[in-house]
Image (cartoon, helix red, strand yellow):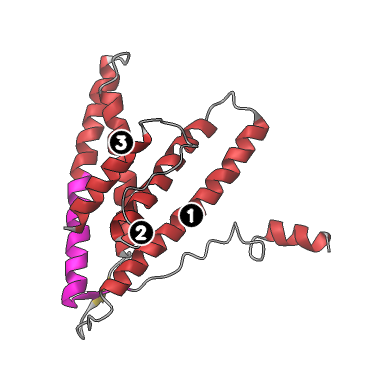
Amino acid sequence: MVSKICNEIFDQCIHDYHLTDMVDTTIRNPFSENGLDHLLYAKNWVDTVQWHLEDIVRNPTIDAVEGLLLKRRIDASNQVRTDMVEYIDSYFLQQYKNINPKVNALVNTESPAWAIDRLSILALKIYHMTVEVNRQDAAEEHVASCSKKLEVLLEQRVDLSQSIDELLSDIAKGDKYMKVYKQMKMYNDPGLNPVLYQLQNKNV
């Protein structure tokens, strides 16, 4: 099952990151290039680093210049994250290129890779909620609240994993077909972000 592979790789990647727990740690992807495993590990590494950047930038005492630089780094990371999702969808498009969808085949509300993206983020939520549950310095109320949230997250992972596997199975059988839309993010594009292109026009 693809979801089982995803969950195992995401958990491994998150564990690997926390060996140093530093956002500038160099990724050491243990999987060979061009395979789904490699893509999944790389995708989750981006998500994990960005998770911690989001924590850092919310420090109320952060220097304003440092905070702005971090925000721009997060924006760049979001673009990489989107690109990684599209790489994963390209993998699945290649896998199912010879499948002829049935006449009554349906298109899913999201592509397989965007569902896997949610699974990656869910793995991070589970990891960090588990940390909160096991905090020795936390109040009982905090631990109890986090324990309930962790139960929900674990249930959500079971449901989402099943949905991903069912979607891929339906695509393989021709009951559903993939229709992938590029995200076309506009804020990073100097030709589409009005603040950027107006500034560029002033400098011409």
Q: Quadrant of residue 116?
A: bottom left
> How far from the left and from the top, in percent, is residue 75?
55, 49
Q: Amino acid at mark 1?
A: Val
* Disc number placed over residue 96 in the picture, else none: none
Tell me the chief SS of the magenta region. helix
Badge 2: how crowded within 10 Å, few (<14), some, or many (20+)? few
> How far from the left and from the top, in percent, is residue 133?
26, 24
Separation (CA) of disc 2 from disc 1: 17 Å
Q: State left or right for residue 47 relative to residue 162.
A: right
Residue hosting label 2: 33
2 or 3: tag closer to the N-terminus: 3
Separation (CA) of disc 2 from disc 3: 21 Å
Q: State left or right for residue 22 relative to residue 168.
A: right
Separation (CA) of disc 3 from disc 1: 21 Å
Looking at this view, name the residue that lies furthest to the bottom: 103
Residue hosting label 3: 15
Q: Secondary structure at mark 3?
A: helix
Q: Nearer the viewer, residue 36 or 113?
A: 36
3 or 1: tag closer to the N-terminus: 3
* Disc number placed over residue 80 in the picture, else none: 1
Is 177 colored magenta in this rendering?
A: yes
Q: Amino acid at mark 3?
A: His
Badge 1: how crowded within 10 Å, few (<14), some, or many (20+)? some
Q: Quadrant of residue 65?
A: top right
Q: Nearer the viewer, residue 33 or 190?
A: 33
Q: Quadrant of residue 38?
A: bottom left
Q: Which residues are magenta?
A: 156-178
Residue at 42%, 44% in the rendered image = 27
Q: Secondary structure at mark 2?
A: loop
